[in-house]
Image (spheres, rainbow, N blue to C red):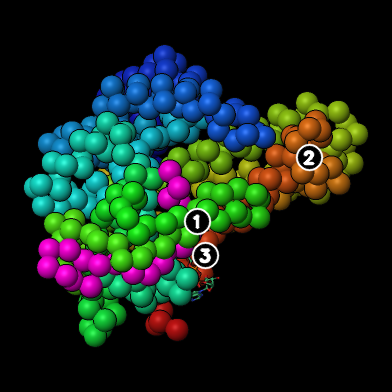
């Protein structure tokens, strides 16, 4: 196995590094922990986004004909790896990752012309209306109804856990357009502005006191039929081709190693009485385990990118990577918390110990990573059935 860059790849890597050296300082969220994204942090992030837009790297995987960078999987991998290595983020969110690629495959020419340029310019923030109170892992049981009325659908129902809905300009979502059809066959994919009358958003505060996701309610929301993506009642299949153009997972794995380096650095810097470093050998052993696991996570990413480089789509291999990396994230958060002994449970931002409460906060935030984007049990089911050929339970 040769993991070294070819000369062309090395040149590209240097290009990315130079770009980060020039613009990257604006993209690091060292942030004001108490107030989250302070106005200054938002301004800096805006400058970083504008630099990426100007460089044409908002959508590394989109084909050039749609204004993307048209990068190969390995180039995307290098870009993501360098971004993660230097602690700067990609931009674009659900627009670039999900609805943009879906429109390229299934959208009308009018839809492509309206939405793709705005996504590339970073002007429109999208949210994803998939989950409902009784439809998460079993998404096809969703009940939000869209009843056809001439040139419009009338939408009634509710979504839940909708990330960023309180900031989003547009939503793409799945709704039931034929309640009598078998459950996967009566669903359509619709898009509408969040300001449409009848849409209301209620933020949900998670246990880390953070309102990242929301409930979204629809009351007689009128959506033009021209905002349906793909055929009526075929939305399940349209939604499931939200292809993983950009889902190599490398960012997570490299970010994991950076996080461990940060933990090590702080462990050595903090006053001895505030950590267990000089007392608990178990902590040192745990840290060694995390280090080994982070290397494994990186190898999972390499595996996935190798599959993509052969023009194939990772399947159970992507699930293995997601499962391992998200559970590792929780183990790292626990290891970080334990470093500070009882101080680790402090959630008081005004005190210096335990990273001003960040250790406890990180522990609480990490819980959701094995639920979001498909739970660990769902990933294990995929590995068992598609990877190991075991029958469905
Ligand atoms: C931080 C975060 C952000 C999110 N953002 C979004 C978003 O932007 N848009 C959106 O639409 N959704 C979003 N979600 C929702 C997410 O997709 C769902 O939470 C997830 O799919 C699980 O669904 P559920 O919560 O309904 O749990 P359920 O599906 O009800 O699962 C409950 C438990 O049962 C287990 N389980 C379910 N089915 C099986 C099975 N077949 N075999 C074994 N065990 C099973 C699950 O693993 C879980 O432990 C987000 C979730 C989180 C945590």
Mark 1–mark 3 distance (CA, rounded to whole Å)? 27 Å
Task: Tell us which disc is closer to us: 1 or 3.
Answer: 1
Quadrant in the picture for residue 385: bottom left
Q: Residues within 10 Å of mark 3 (few under 14, many from 20)?
A: many
The part of the chain drawn in magenta is 147-167
* 162 in magenta: yes
Residue 235, percent from left and from top: 23, 66
Label 1 sits on residue: 202
Mark 3–mark 2 distance (CA, rounded to whole Å)? 31 Å
Residue 112, percent from left and from top: 15, 45
**In the image, is 165 to the left or to the right of 74?**
right
Which SS class for mark 2?
Answer: loop
Q: Which mark is residue 376?
A: 3
Q: Earlier in the sequence, mark 1 or mark 3?
A: 1
Q: Quadrant of the C terminus?
A: bottom left
In this rendering, the answer to whether 279 lies above or below 242 is above
Label 2 sits on residue: 348
């Amino acid at each position: 196995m040769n993991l070294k860059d070819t000369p062309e790849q090395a040149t590209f890597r240097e290009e990315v590094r130079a770009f980060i050296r020039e613009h990257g300082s604006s993209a690091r969220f060292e942030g004001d922990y108490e107030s989250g994204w302070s106005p200054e942090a938002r301004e800096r992030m805006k400058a970083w986004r504008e630099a990426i837009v100007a460089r044409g790297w908002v959508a590394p995987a989109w084909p050039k004909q749609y204004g993307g960078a048209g990068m190969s999987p390995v180039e995307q991998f290098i870009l993501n790896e360098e971004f993660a290595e230097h602690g700067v983020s990609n931009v674009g969110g659900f627009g670039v990752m999900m609805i943009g690629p879906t429109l390229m495959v299934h959208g009308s020419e009018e839809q492509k012309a309206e939405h793709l340029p705005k996504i590339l310019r970073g002007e429109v923030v999208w949210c994803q209306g998939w989950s409902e109170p009784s439809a998460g892992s079993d998404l096809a049981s969703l009940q939000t109804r869209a009843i056809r009325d001439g040139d419009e659908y009338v939408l009634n129902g509710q979504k839940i856990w909708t990330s960023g809905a309180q900031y989003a300009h547009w939503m793409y979502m799945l709704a039931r357009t034929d309640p009598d059809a078998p459950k996967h066959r009566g669903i359509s994919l619709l898009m509408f502005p969040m300001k449409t009358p009848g849409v209301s958003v209620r933020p949900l505060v998670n246990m880390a006191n953070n309102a990242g996701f929301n409930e979204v309610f629809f009351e007689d929301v009128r959506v033009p039929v021209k905002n349906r993506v793909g055929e009526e009642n075929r939305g399940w299949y349209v939604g499931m081709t939200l292809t993983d153009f950009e889902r190599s997972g490398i960012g997570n794995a490299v970010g994991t190693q950076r996080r461990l380096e940060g933990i090590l650095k702080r462990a050595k810097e903090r006053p001895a009485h505030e950590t267990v470093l000089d007392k608990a050998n178990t902590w040192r052993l745990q840290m060694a385990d995390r280090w080994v696991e982070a290397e494994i996570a990186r190898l999972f990413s390499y595996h996935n990118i190798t599959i993509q480089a052969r023009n194939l789509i990772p399947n159970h291999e992507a699930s293995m990577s997601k499962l391992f990396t998200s559970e590792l994230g929780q183990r790292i958060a626990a290891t970080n918390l334990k470093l500070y002994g009882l101080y680790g449970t402090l959630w008081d931002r005004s005190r210096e110990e335990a990273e001003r409460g960040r250790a406890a906060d990180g522990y609480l935030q990490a819980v959701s990573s094995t639920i979001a984007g498909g739970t660990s049990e769902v990933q294990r089911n995929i590995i068992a059935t598609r990877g190991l050929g075991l029958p469905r339970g």
